[in-house]
Amino acid sequence: MTFTLHPFSAILPADWLLLLNHPDVIRHMPLATESWTEQAVVEWAKGKDAQWQAHGYGPWAIRIDGAFAGWGGFQQEGREADLALVLLPEFWGCGPALVRAFMRRRLELGIGAVSLLLPPSRTRVRGLARIGFAFDCEVEYDGRRFLKFRAVE
């Protein structure tokens, strides 16, 4: 597997629409409440890219072996960085390698504490320990429950 990281704006809106409206992806995204439109995707991508200027880090669009796979990276969440990863189903097995690669880059980006949030629908979480995360607590965002994991220092 060879992956490359790109600004969100480098990905065609049609590719984003495929990911963000994919039923297997959105069933694990409880905050996604409506279908995406091309204009909404363009604005969302601008916001994701703007995180780099605002915080010195942010998420990337991901290509695996040249194909658009999804997005992932760090987003500021309070006083820590939240690690997000959203992939098309055919790339779900690549998640652990991507998380490890992101975590290797965190120091060069000036990131300290890292957490990640998963909806309770993500029941296969034992592998998080193998990539350096431990369960911390349950949290609520916009009335939805999430499981919070922290990177073990």
Image (tube, rainbow, N blue to C red):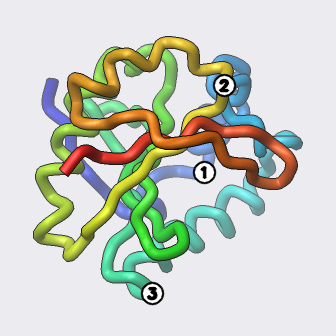
At label 3, which amino acid type do we have?
A: Ala
Task: Give the x, y percent position of residue 19.
Answer: 59, 34
Task: Give the x, y percent position of residue 93.
Answer: 33, 15
Q: Which residue is mark 1?
A: 13
Q: Is residue 45 left or right of residue 90?
A: right
Q: Which residue is mark 3?
A: 54
Q: Work out whether residue 144 or residue 30 is closer to the camera in this orientation and state it.
A: 144
Q: Quadrant of the rendered structure where residue 110 is?
A: bottom left
- SS for callout 3: helix
Q: Is residue 98 left or right of residue 72?
A: left
Task: Give the x, y percent position of residue 52.
Answer: 38, 77
Name the mark on residue 120.
Answer: 2
Q: Quadrant of the rendered structure where residue 82 is?
A: bottom left
| Residue 65 shows up from this direction | no
Q: Residues within 10 Å of mark 3 (few under 14, many from 20)?
A: few
Residue visible at 23% across and 36% down in the picture: 132
Q: Residues within 10 Å of mark 1 (few under 14, many from 20)?
A: some
Q: Nearer the viewer, mark 2 or mark 3?
A: 2
**On screen, residue 50 above or below 72:** below
Mark 1 or mark 3, which has the lower sequence index? 1
Residue visible at 27% across and 31% down in the picture: 64
Q: Residue furthest front?
A: 137
| Residue 135 shows up from this direction | yes
Q: Work out whether residue 33 or residue 149 is closer to the camera in this orientation and state it.
A: 149
Residue visible at 56% across and 14% down in the picture: 123
- SS for callout 1: helix
At label 1, which amino acid type do we have?
A: Pro
